[in-house]
Amino acid sequence: MAIMLANSWRLEALKRQVDISSGAPVQARLFTNNRTPAATDALTDYTEASGGGYAAQQIDSGDWEAVEASPSELSASVTFEFTGPLAGAAQAYGVYLTSGGKLVGAERFAGPANITGPQTPVHLSPVTLRN
């Protein structure tokens, strides 16, 4: 027998997956290795950006907007700002999310972002999680 999950539970399950219900923050991070995210990925598969004033961006529980549907969605806007180029003139290939030291998920950009300094912020609007 298979139970059909209600949309309201799908949304609650998604919130619990990223610990939003308990108030634990999610961190948005840029990755600089040229990879395509997969369901089997681990946190160690991603090389986090560094240099140029880069910092991971925290998404607090109140920053998420929830949509109860099929699939249910959580979304939040994130902006990365820089003071200079990334270390080693690296390019950002996408964004990955972490929570509690674990990988939540990742998305590859349509093309790599060439970060040259303050004039090249990266706006992610929105970062969307679906269940």
Image (cartoon, grey):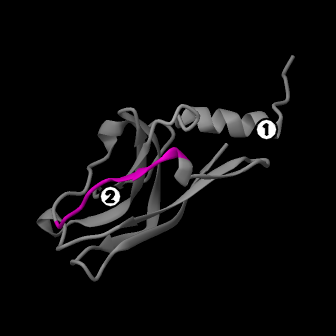
Task: Find residue 22 and name its label.
Answer: none
Identify the image quadrant of residue 78. Answer: bottom left
- The residue depicted at 80 percent of the width and 40 percent of the height is 7
- Left or right of 34 in this view: 69: right
User: Badge 2, how many Cα within 10 Å: few under 14, some, many 20+?
Assistant: some
Disc 2 to disc 1, how far (Cα)? 37 Å
- Left or right of 73 in this view: 126: left
**Secondary structure state at the residue bearing disc 1:** helix
Q: Is residue 56 magenta?
A: yes
Q: Percent x, y for residue 113?
A: 34, 72
Q: Percent x, y for residue 40?
A: 47, 35
Observer-side mark, 2 or 1, equals 1
Is 61 drawn above or below residue 3 in the view shown? below
5, 44: nearer the viewer: 5
* Range of residues picked out in magenta: 52-61
User: Badge 1, how many Cα within 10 Å: few under 14, some, many 20+?
Assistant: few
Q: Label 1 sits on what residue type?
A: Ser
41, 66: nearer the viewer: 66
- The residue depicted at 30 percent of the width and 70 percent of the height is 81
- Left or right of 115 in this view: 5: right
Q: Is residue 6 magenta?
A: no
In the rendered image, which residue does mark 2 sit on?
34
Check if mark 2's residue and mark 1's residue have beta carbons within 8 Å. Answer: no
Q: Percent x, y for residue 17?
A: 56, 33
In the rendered image, which residue does mark 1 sit on?
8
